[in-house]
Image: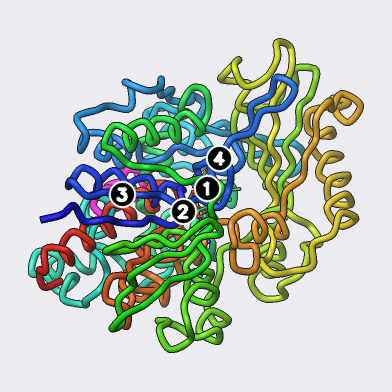
Amino acid sequence: MSQKKIAIIGSGFAGLAGASVLAQAKLDVHVFEKNESIGGRARQFKNQGFSFDMGPSWYWMPDVFDRFFERFGKSTTDYFELKKLDPGFQVIFNDSETLKIPGEYQELLQLFEDIESGAADKLEKFMSEAKYKYEVGVNDLVYQPGLSILELLRPDLMKGVFRLQVFSSFSNHVKKYFKDPRLISLMEFPILFLGAMPKDTPALYSLMNYAGLKIGTFYPMGGFGKLIDAMESIALEQGVQFHSNEAVNGFNFEAKTITHLTSRKTNYKFDAIMASADYHHVEQKLLPKELRNYTESYWEKRVFAPSSLLFYLGVNKKIAKLLHHNLFFDEDLTPHAEDIYLNKRWPKKPLFYVCCPSKTDNTVAPEGSENIFILMPVAPGIEDTDEIRETYFKSLLKRLENYTNEAIEEHIVFKKSYCIKDFQQDYNAYKGNAYGLANTLMQTANLKPKMRNKKVKNLFYAGQLTVPGPGVPPSLISGQVAAKQIINYLNQKTI
Ligand SMILES: Cc1cc2nc3c(=O)[nH]c(=O)nc-3n(C[C@H](O)[C@H](O)[C@H](O)COP(=O)(O)OP(=O)(O)OC[C@H]3O[C@@H](n4cnc5c(N)ncnc54)[C@H](O)[C@@H]3O)c2cc1C
């Protein structure tokens, strides 16, 4: 039998993970990427001695990465050094009061107790529930394809279903344990990664607290670009072929099956397709109307995680008061979140995040300099102009200068902004979204856009807009799960 040929659209974490799994199954795998460099939202760029990770900076859930590398008889340490950050991060409140979050859990318990009497015991109870959710959620549920409700109606899961707390709100859950507003903010912050308000997010996601506070925050030395390089090496070893700078622009069909994929260069014959580019783009731009899973109005009704206004800065001096991860919670979260989700406008008093990887890694900036990345969450789809970006740049920098008590602006030797228009142009991202769909109750697990096209037999979707959701670990899992679906399809198994 001739070797089956599989095309993967997009070289982000989902595409890279899926490609290696499929090639390991002795399939002939080709990855098509519209950009020059691979890695999708996690690409890296270099300028004037600075190396900037363009997207992800928090390496959480190392076990998910380990599990992927083990599939190929490898370990992450074969490719990069993984450092546990201690402190993991700091939160900056009003009047420059800061909470430094220890990397060691015993010290975290002490910190909680110092802030609120009895909070250490409560954190222990909170974490023991969160551990259960992490073990069931991250080790099992997220590896399900989300195609049938039967995946969730298993006796072992049904026994513990109440412990998973899928139907109660995260916000209420946290407030049952803690009273101090700083502890509440600290516990609610990981939920912002999931792109929704804590009140709209199921309490199931306290597994994120377990990931971030108990397991800890890690950093791949050299940056996330090293993780992409490692995944590329695995893919190449398995025989994957990359076609970068080659956007896919359509398909040919026969009997509701894709026969060929077309790019600006040519027309290739394939047996199955994994589309890991933004789901909306693939459906609305590459498929005829009658073969789409969802309509434009379906997408219009989804709750998207925020987009981001980003600044990549090279600064020619050291800034003492910054840590690797710095969360500026010096304004109230609610009005900012309302501007993202309800008012859908530029925020009046935004919170923001500053990453300074040169605190940990001297390869990402010239000696004596800092590599700084500023991220401010914004509503997807709003007007994006250079003037608006600059107005926010000035005000965020002022807050940064006030907190650090340093002049920064005159020391900036490299500056690049990135926002909605860039996400649209670089990644074909719907409304310029940065991290996909929000994990609200109505958009969790089986309620997400489906991994399989219902009308085209050999078209499967992967990535942050389908199961299990946004973030690097979920995208990595998504590619592996979609690959398994394709292998099953090729083996003509019932899925
Ligand atoms: C600023 C930012 C910060 C983040 N921070 C974190 C973090 O700290 N931790 C974390 O876990 N997650 C973080 N995330 C989320 C995480 O980066 C993403 O969820 C993940 O990288 C998405 O991977 P993906 O494979 O689904 O999609 P992508 O990385 O977007 O890959 C899709 C690829 O498809 C390509 N493509 C699009 N259209 C076509 C076409 N027609 N033909 C060919 N190719 C095409 C795109 O160019 C892209 O390379 C962050 C994201 C952003 C943007």
First reached walking from the N terminus: tag 3 or tag 2 = 2
Magenta span dominant secondary structure: helix
- Which amino acid is tagged 3? Val
Which residue in the protein does label 2 denote?
10
Q: Nearer the viewer, residue 269 or 341?
A: 269
Q: Residue at x 20, y 42 (%)?
A: 24
The residues tagged by marks 1 and 3 sit, at their Cα atoms, a distance apart of 18 Å
Q: Residue at x 65, y 56 (%)?
A: 423
Which residue in the protein does label 3 denote?
29
Which class describes the residues within 10 Å of circle 2: few (<14), some (14-19), or many (20+)? many
x and y percentages locating residue 332 in the rendered image:
70, 57
- Residues at badges 2 and 1 in contact (C-beta under 8 Å)? yes
Q: Taking 289 as reference, is 439 above or below it?
A: above
Which residue in the protein does label 4 denote?
37
Which residue in the protein does label 1 denote?
40
Q: Residue at x 54, y 61 (%)?
A: 195
Q: Quadrant of the C terminus?
A: bottom left
> What is the quadrant of residue 1 in the picture?
bottom left
Which class describes the residues within 10 Å of circle 1: few (<14), some (14-19), or many (20+)? many
Of marks 3 and 2, the one in the foreground: 3
Secondary element at image label 4: loop
The residues tagged by marks 4 and 2 sit, at their Cα atoms, a distance apart of 11 Å
